[in-house]
Image (cartoon, rainbow, N blue to C red):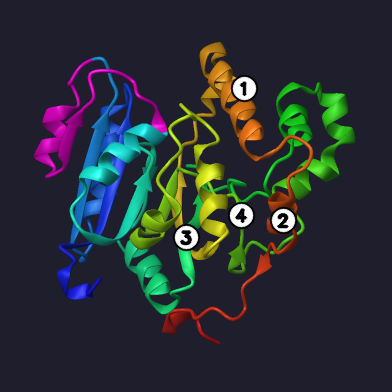
Amino acid sequence: MDKLTYEYDVVGSIVAYKSDPTELEQAIRSFINTPLRVKMLVVDNSPSQALGPMCRDLGSEYLFTSGNCGFGAGHNIALRQAAVSEYHLVLNPDVRFEPNVLVELIDFLALNESVGLVMPRVLYPDGSAQNLCKRLPDPFDMLSRRTFPRPLKRLCHTRMSLFELSDFNTNMVLSVPYLSGCFMLLRKKCLLECGLFDERFFMYFEDVDLTRRIHERYETVYYPHAKITHRHDRGSYKSLRLLFYGVQSAVRYFNKWGWVWDEQRDLANSVIGPLVNLSLPDRFRL
């Protein structure tokens, strides 16, 4: 598609469900506070339309679903209705970032046509790092992280650390097959080729499923030179209902990709590492 036909540089989508209005407003303002041509769509899975006036006041398109259709399905509603753009940002309502972040990431994507998805460095509100770059999981990774008591977790510490790529320098641009859905900046044509979110995943695992599908055709990249703040509520550790969704999605994920034998997982995990041949914006070139 000719770039001159793009109505926006980036269209963003947020799926809200009883979201904190102040946090949601910060997320929207982070997105629109940029020199880029942007448009935000908020898909609201909440029981009421209480968030609607604030979203509209900020210039967002507000889509009320009248029921909780899930994370991936909600973003798919936005993706199917979104105006024409070169890039699409999947954003959580508990994320905030500075105006230069989108510009920096789009500059990087524009220089590297082989990259289909990029995620920046993600920090907790206190400034500490969130380990959201991961290897593609196997059932043991999920079981040990969620069910093992602390003594057993200590015995598996090395494996758990490797799952979160602790053996790599996270100050470098990395090829990663599993990136978090809290902030996914996507090249729109990649979604058309690889497909949207798999709506069988109501909540959890939709991000790893989409990342690995894109990773089969394009680079999926962790880019540490831009950073965002993510509150990261870790709801499945606090709520039995959310834990159920997590277990349900894990079963569906491994049914889809394989429980023990997953050749694509092994291949994707084997090529994780620095991407030294990609171009960086001028200010980061040595």
Q: Secondary structure at mark 3?
A: strand
| Residue at x-position 37% and y-position 75% | 110
Q: Which residue in the protein does label 2 denote?
A: 269
Spatial distance from mark 3 to mark 4, Cα to Cα? 11 Å
Specify the label residue 118 is tagged with. Answer: 3
**Residue 221: x, y in percent?**
54, 62
Give the magenta range: 48-71
User: Is 228 a magenta residue?
Assistant: no
Q: Which residue is mark 4?
A: 177
- The residue lying toward the viewer, choosing from 75 and 191, is 191
The mark nearer the N terminus, 2 or 3, is 3
Image coordinates for residue 3, horizontal then vertical, percent: 22, 74
Please tell me which residue lies in front, 166 or 76. Answer: 76
Q: Earlier in the sequence, mark 4 or mark 2?
A: 4
Q: Is residue 23 visible?
A: no
Q: Do the numbered discs 4 and 2 sit on residues whose CB atoms are within 8 Å?
A: yes
Q: Amino acid at mark 1?
A: Val
Tell me which amino acid carries mark 3: Val
Q: Residue 14 versus residue 171: which sits nearer the camera?
A: 14
Determine the CA span between mark 4 and mark 1. 21 Å
Of the image marks 4 and 1, the number of the one nearer the N terminus: 4
Left or right: residue 240 versus residue 229 is right
The verdict on residue 70 being magenta is: yes
Task: Please name the residue that numbered disc 1 is placed on.
Answer: 247
State the SS at label 1.
helix
Position of 134 relative to 87 (above/below)? above
Q: Amino acid at mark 4?
A: Pro
